[in-house]
Image (tube, rainbow, N blue to C red):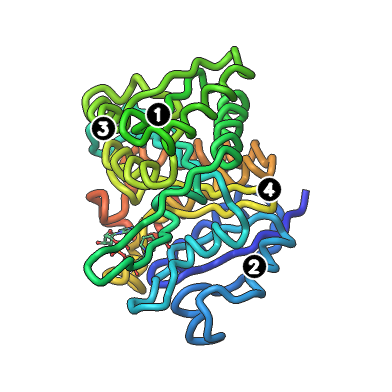
């Protein structure tokens, strides 16, 4: 099947890793027309806005985008492009699979869990104002509608992916109304999915358990701010942000992105590790029902890691981005 996908090459190392992932996806035999659009610093320079309307139209039309990291210009008045995209397209579900890769030094080489994060509400929405000088107020809005929608997404996802248990992280013992509502919605939705185990943990305890015995978790459901923090914690358990993919999913479309930033310190040198964006590309292919190509790329990537001969500099090797891509393509043949 032919696909049209919006491609956001991003800034810094973004274009290098994006073109590498495009090359690997095409080598796997997927028929794609890429519609390239700019966002962030480059878009600001060209179009005077970090999030051009043409980009939003393209994603709305194609329903799917692959996004490289973007430099958020420093200074007041620039909202994050990532937050802007999530809001504009109502990408309410953030999915981050945390899976250790072979031969990458890390604390938990067997870890395989998934974080499902509510992407639109809570303190992360950044609704703040100054009440009087010296006093600020930040609003934590939690709604039944958004909490039920994300809980349902987590259960449907778990069923589809063969996951067995969802743990809801919360602080309902203190924030009885807001986190209490999030937890209530989770419990109500859980009743419709008797085949999936549902439990919950207070978020501070969940963090300690994650560091001590992370293998007890399968899928974690978290509101926006907890999800932001805990997903970086989990990336640390398997070797860092450079290895973790992300998907932002809504009814109108989905944006797949690496979790790391634009790494300006190594941009243009051809040494960036494309793994995180490639893993995001694999999630995208599964979303597009290109399961065979997704498995083919994933197997090749795992084989290259297993052999350990071709590694980029960030994980102790000397290979250039292009050499790493060549090794993966070679394994797909
Ligand atoms: P960063 O993730 O870009 O870099 C942190 C460190 O990790 C650097 O030493 C970098 O060289 C290294 N690194 C990151 N990705 C790598 C890769 N694929 N291969 C090899 N090494 C890699 O974080 P930083 O420096 O805090 O942010 C830089 C810029 O990125 C900022 O403008 C920030 O706003 C933006 N950013 C964008 C994100 C996005 O678009 N999703 C997410 C996080 C930051």
Q: Whereabouts is ligand 1, in terms of quadrant? A: bottom left
Q: Which residue is mark 1?
A: 112
> How far from the left and from the top, in percent, is residue 13?
39, 67
Q: CA distance from mark 4 to mark 3?
A: 32 Å
> How far from the left and from the top, in percent, is residue 312?
31, 54
Identify which residue, 238 or 168, lies in the foreground: 168
For this view, does 321 lie left or right of residue 266?
Answer: right
The mark lying in front, picked from 2 and 3, is 3
Q: Which residue is mark 2?
A: 56
Tell which circle, 4 or 3, labels the residue nearer the N-terminal end. Answer: 3
Tell which circle, 3 or 1, labels the residue nearer the N-terminal end. Answer: 1
Q: Which mark is on residue 251?
A: 4
Q: Which residue is mark 3?
A: 204
For this view, does 296 lie left or right of residue 209?
Answer: right
In terms of secondary structure, where does tag 3 sit? helix
Q: CA distance from mark 4 to mark 1?
A: 27 Å
Residues at marks 4 and 3 touching, judged by CB atoms closer than 8 Å = no
In terms of secondary structure, where does tag 4 sit? loop
The mark lying in front, picked from 4 and 1, is 4
Tell which circle, 2 or 3, labels the residue nearer the N-terminal end. Answer: 2
Tell which circle, 2 or 1, labels the residue nearer the N-terminal end. Answer: 2
In terms of secondary structure, where does tag 2 sit? helix
In terms of secondary structure, where does tag 1 sit? strand
At x 32% / y 28%, what residue is drawn? 173
Q: CA distance from mark 2 to mark 4?
A: 14 Å
Q: Is residue 321 above or below residue 189?
A: below
> How far from the left and from the top, in percent, is residue 223?
44, 40
């Amino acid at each position: 099947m032919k696909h049209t996908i919006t491609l956001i090459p991003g800034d810094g190392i973004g274009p290098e890793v994006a073109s590498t992932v495009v090359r690997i996806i095409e080598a796997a035999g997927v028929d794609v027309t890429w519609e390239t659009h700019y966002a962030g610093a480059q878009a600001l320079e060209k179009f005077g806005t970090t999030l051009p309307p043409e980009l939003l139209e393209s994603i709305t039309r194609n329903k799917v985008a692959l996004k490289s990291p973007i430099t958020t210009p420093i200074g007041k008045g620039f909202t994050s492009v990532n937050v802007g995209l999530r809001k504009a397209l109502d990408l309410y579900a953030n999915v981050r699979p945390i899976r250790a890769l072979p031969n990458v030094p890390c604390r938990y080489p067997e870890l395989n869990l998934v974080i499902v994060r509510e992407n639109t509400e809570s303190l992360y929405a950044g609704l703040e104002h100054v009440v009087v000088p010296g006093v600020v107020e930040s609003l934590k809005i939690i709604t039944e509608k958004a909490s039920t929608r994300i809980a349902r997404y987590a259960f449907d996802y778990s069923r589809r992916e063969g996951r067995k248990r969802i743990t809801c992280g919360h602080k309902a013992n203190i924030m009885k109304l807001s986190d209490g509502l999030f937890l209530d919605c989770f419990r109500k939705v859980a009743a419709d999915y008797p085949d999936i185990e549902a439990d919950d943990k207070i978020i501070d305890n969940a963090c300690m358990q994650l560091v001590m015995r992370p293998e007890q978790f399968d899928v974690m459901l978290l509101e926006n701010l907890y999800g932001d923090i805990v997903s970086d914690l989990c990336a640390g358990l398997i070797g860092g942000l450079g290895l973790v993919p992300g998907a932002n999913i809504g009814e109108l479309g989905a944006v797949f992105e690496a979790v790391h930033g634009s790494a300006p310190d190594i941009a243009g040198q051809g040494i960036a590790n494309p793994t995180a964006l490639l893993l995001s590309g694999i999630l995208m292919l599964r979303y597009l029902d290109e399961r065979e190509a997704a498995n083919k790329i994933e197997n090749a990537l795992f084989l290259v890691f297993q052999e350990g001969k071709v590694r980029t500099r960030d994980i102790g090797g000397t290979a250039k981005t292009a050499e790493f891509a060549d090794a993966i393509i070679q394994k797909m043949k």
